[in-house]
Amino acid sequence: MAESPIERVYRRGPLRNVWPSTARPLTHRAARKADASYGVSDTPDWRNVDWPAHTKQVEINGRSVNYVDIGRGTQTVLFIHGLGGSWQNWLENLPRTAEHCRAIALDLPGFGRSEMPADPISITGFAATVDAFCEALGLGPVVLVGNSMGGFTAAEVAIQHPERAELLVLVDAAGISSANVTRSRPGERLARQLMMRGQGDPEAAKRMLTRPGYMALGMGLVARYPTRISKELLSEQLLTFGDAGFSDAFEAILSYDFRHRLGEIGCPVLVIQGENDILVPLGDAIEFCELIPSSELLTMADTGHVPMFERPVQFNDALLDFIAAPTAATG
């Protein structure tokens, strides 16, 4: 695993607490500089899985929650997507994980095919839903793997429901610099612009797959080289573009600060971070590791906000190694 960088990687100047990453979106021509491993699918191939056969629903607090459930094993890995995402964010990771463990990915309330929750959306509410979801499925402690808002949620589960978290994997997790965004007027304005950019017409979003320049513009905040990722995988990510829970969840991310409680997390933690993430800077991952006692940082070079499908082979290797020997990863 890569050693944690000594220096924090944050933007400087008046917007340092607003958009702190030093990374910037690239043009589609820059994809020619990506190394050969970027965007390469792992095996088993997710395209060969009969996903409808593994798709189920369960009622949580009077609302339907959609999820996929695949594989068997003594351990259960629960994948939690980020803002604007769905269980399909983990298509490249579920099949290989299922060779060793029971692998489950859910749609959070208000996203994918899950209904909006009865109560207002909040990070604490998402964590309570995850805990209730595990209880409804008869699960004990699970390996929680969360990306972005899903990492924020997974960490909150480990704080609020510590008996549920066997291991914790935070993937470009929100919850650090996001707490500073609304403390300045420029931060609020930029946050609203990003929110509007995240909402839109799913059909228009799918059309961008035929235009490399538009794809680089539309997906450039998320992936380092969008045009190097298969169109089949990207199209699956756009199925839930503009879900009903998006704006409320966005507000929930900005309005909640749990940094003072991260020291309460007692399970082993692996923090995985794309070094060129525009939305969540590398400095946030370093701070997670400073605040969580039993944690280790793995950085992925030339990678953006979603390393699980930008570099699925490397990601899956790291995840499965951590599950097999968490003390080695955090020792």
Image (spheres, grey):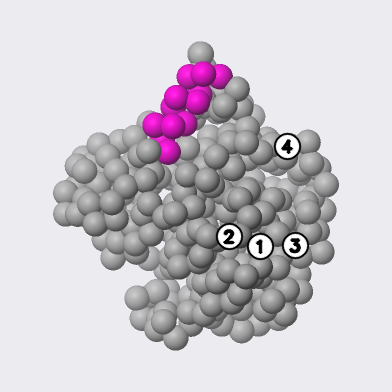
| Residue highlighted by disc 3 | 165
For mark 4, does the 10 Å Cα neighbourhood hold few (<14), some (14 to 19), or many (20 or more) residues?
Answer: some
SS class, disc 1:
helix
**Contact flag, marks 2 and 3 (Cβ < 8 Å):** no
Q: Is residue 161 visible?
A: yes
Residue 8 occupies quadrant? top right
Residue at image position (51%, 13%) is 14
**Contact flag, marks 3 and 1 (Cβ < 8 Å):** no
Picture layout, residue 315 above or below residue 172: below
Q: Position of residue 118 (x, y in %)?
A: 61, 60
Q: Is residue 105 visible?
A: no
SS class, disc 4:
helix
Q: CA distance from mark 1 to mark 4?
A: 21 Å
Q: CA distance from mark 1 to mark 2?
A: 9 Å
**Contact flag, marks 1 and 2 (Cβ < 8 Å):** yes
Foreground label between 2 and 4: 2
Describe residue 211's horizontal placement relative to residue 173 as left or right.
Answer: left
For mark 3, does the 10 Å Cα neighbourhood hold few (<14), some (14 to 19), or many (20 or more) residues?
Answer: many
Q: Assess whether residue 194 is covered by the magenta stretch.
A: yes
Q: Earlier in the sequence, mark 1 or mark 2?
A: 2
| Residue highlighted by disc 1 | 129
Range of the magenta residues?
184-195
Q: Position of residue 246 (x, y in %)?
A: 47, 49
Residue 117 — which label?
Answer: 2
Q: Position of residue 17 (x, y in %)?
A: 56, 23
Q: CA distance from mark 3 to mark 1?
A: 14 Å
| Residue highlighted by disc 4 | 259
Describe residue 153's horizontal placement relative to residue 223 as left or right.
Answer: right
Residue 321 — which label?
Answer: none
Residue 158 occupies quadrant? bottom right
Foreground label between 3 and 1: 1
